[in-house]
Image (cartoon, grey):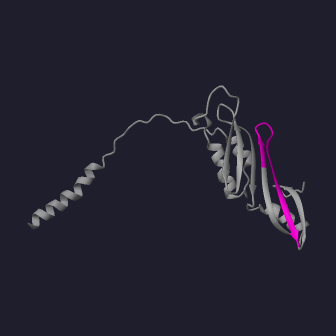
Amino acid sequence: MKKFIIGLFVIGLTSPVFAQVPKVEKLSEVVVTAVNYKYLNATDSKEVAIPVKMLERKAAAYNVQDADFYSDDYDFYTVSFFIPEGKIVAAYNPEGQIIRTIERFENIKLPSAVRDAVAERFPKWTIVKDAYRVTYNQKTGANKSYKLKLKNGDKTMRVKIDDTGEFL
């Protein structure tokens, strides 16, 4: 009985060794292309908030050719993307490239350049509300700006600033 159990144990250890013989198969070539890399490069910044970056990547990865409403008859397709923090309205051409976008996000984390510029120019004011707006055009690139509502006691003020900290 002891030899029988040892024999089963040895067979149990050696059988997986023979099962690990790799099968070599030749796979077809896969080409990966980034259709909307210009959009992502134009809208990308180092300190952009995570919800903004997430929704911009969703818009860039969206394939309009797989949509139910796709037809070769139209010059462009308008698609909206929503999250609680904001929205993107993107226009795609029939090849799936983003032609233009309008983006608006509210109460997101501000970049340090914007925070520092506001703190330097308005030292005793606090930021109560903010709105981040991006307009992208395939020919002209991206225009990014922040609208801020500042408060100091019972006084309020609205300022507009770009993503580099320049007041507009």
Instruction: Tell whether 137 sits left or right of 124.
Output: left
Q: Residue at x 75, y 61 (%)?
A: 107
For residue 87, above or below residue 92: below
Q: Residue at x 49, y 34 (%)?
A: 29
- Indicate whether residue 105 is drawn in magenta: no
Measured as percent of width and height from the top left, residue 31 is found at 55, 36
Nearest to the observer: residue 137 or residue 45: 137
Determine which quarter of the picture holds residue 135: top right
| Magenta part, dominant SS | strand
Q: Residue furthest top?
A: 73
Q: Which residues fall within the magenta stretch?
A: 134-152
Nearest to the observer: residue 72 or residue 161: 72
Measured as percent of width and height from the top left, residue 128 is found at 81, 66
Measured as percent of width and height from the top left, residue 48 is found at 72, 56
Determine which quarter of the picture holds residue 114: bottom right
Determine which quarter of the picture holds residue 66: top right
For residue 20, above or below residue 123: above
Nearest to the observer: residue 78 or residue 52: 78
- Indicate whether residue 149 is drawn in magenta: yes
Q: Quadrant of the N terminus?
A: bottom left
Query: Number of callouts in the render?
Result: 0
Instruction: Tell whether 86 sits left or right of 20.
Output: right
Q: Quadrant of the C terminus?
A: bottom right
For residue 60, above or below residue 130: above
